[in-house]
Amino acid sequence: MKRKIIIFLNVLLIIALGTSCSSKPKSVQSQIFAMDTVMSLTAYGKNSDEAVKAATGEINRLDKMLSANDADSEVSKINASSGSFVTVSGAVLRQIAVAKEVSDRSGGAFDISILPLVELWGFGTDKAHVPSNGEISEAMSKLNYRGIEATDSSVRIPQGTKITLAAIAKGYTSQHLCELFKGMGVSSAIVSLGGNVQAVGVKPDGSKWRVAVQDPNDTAKFLGTVEIADLAVVTSGGYQRYFEENGVSYHHILDPKTGRPAESGLSSVTIVCADGTLADALSTALFVLGEDGAIEYWRSYGGFEAILVTNDGRVVVTEGLKSSFSLSGSYKLQYAGK
Amino acid sequence: MREQMKSISNLKLIVIFAALILASAASILIMTERRQDALIAEIYSEGKLLYTIDLNKVTESYTIELPHNTVLVEHGQISMKCADCPDQVCVRQGKIKNGAYPIVCLPNRVEIRITNKAGVDAVTGR
């Protein structure tokens, strides 16, 4: 009798072990430097090894293709041949299409032809300085997003203009990587490309991913978290990149209409959207537009949700995020409805 | 003779039983370790946040070169590998694994800070 009990218990344990082993999700993680920032990828389940390897290769390929600083990139070729059509990849065509749509809808608050102005101010280099009014006017005369034309295989920018995809490239890359993961059979993954977050599916245990939003006034803290499945979360804020001259702070999100850092009353804009490319472009556009313009854009076009942090201490959240956003910290929470 | 054989077989079964218990315990341990929360390190230069890194996601160590400092990023820990400051306090502090004491290089105004944020899978906004 004792023997039978012991045998029975052994069999039970073997079954328990067997099932517990198979439910353990395999995870593969990778962290690399690219596009001037830290990128981290995490994929779960079978094929995650090959998927992460392939994703790393794609990041490096896209970095070379899109960097305005690399003379061999497609963006540099477009800039060097302004006035003529240049054959480009689908990646560039997609970013230009999204950029044009957001530019038109935001009345020019988003403008990829802003490169002359960015170079003039010198953000990100040790030559960052406040230019003279004359220099700013001269650079602004080169902006012309309306004149950007695209066919299904090529792009032409007006003579004398220069474009940069810096405000949209990371979003495109996260979107591309998530599509790559799905195509390779990975149904649970999350990437963070210098703060551009995008996820595939939900976590292996079935729960949603929790993405924290940095507090623009104290980057060591979070102002809240948003729970997502299969979405991108992208934040733009002046606090991310700026320089100081004579005690005044100048941040890197320039307003194409003034040629100077946007003073729209917002400290940061976070976009939650199914498309990473669109999320990236919108975060910049809505930051420049300011609270009223941002809410109006959301009401007119939709397709995303937003979290706006205002300079006067409020967090305005579009109502689609009511059940997935939770505030932590001392901001005053308001919801914006349609 | 038969009695002896029976008790040896019983013994074998008990040993197998014990081994299986141990194996289950081990697999439970391994499974729970998998669920690692984010361990977020932030690198500041001149008060500006330059990098946000989840140390629990680091698979291979690497360095970040700043103009006057080099940061060594490893799984679960971070340190100032070298600096050109005269006192080297930041380098001697060694590796940090939690938010108790940030690493600060005062002369070069570089700071490495860890924020333990439980339950967060990613941070947006850098």
Image: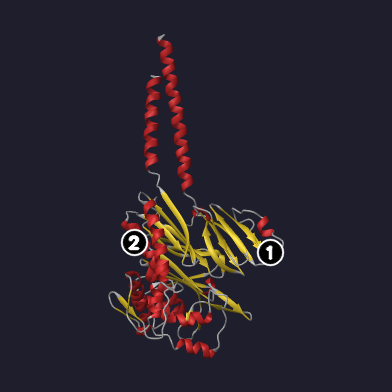
- Identify the subunit bearing mark 2: A
User: Label 2 belongs to which residue?
Assistant: A179
* Quadrant of the rendered image containing residue A51: bottom left
User: Label 1 belongs to which residue?
Assistant: B85
Q: What residue do we see at 35% from left, 49% from top? A: A46
Front in this rendered view, residue A13 or B27: B27
Q: Quadrant of the C terminus of chain A?
A: bottom left
Q: Secondary structure at mark 1?
A: loop
Q: Quadrant of the N terminus of chain A?
A: top left
Instruction: Answer yes or no: are tags 1 and 2 on the same subunit.
Output: no
Q: Residue furthest bottom?
A: A134
Q: Amino acid at mark 1?
A: Cys
Callout 1–callout 2 Cβ contact below 8 Å: no
| Alpha carbons under labels 1 and 2: distance apart | 46 Å
Residue B108 in picture, x, y percent from top left: 65, 67
Vertical placement of A20 versus B9: above or below? below
Residue A72 in picture, x, y percent from top left: 41, 72
Few, some or many C-alpha atoms within 10 Å of disc 2 (few <14, some 14-19, many ≥20)? Answer: few
Q: What residue do we see at 58% from left, 57% from top? A: B72
Residue B27 in picture, x, y percent from top left: 45, 39
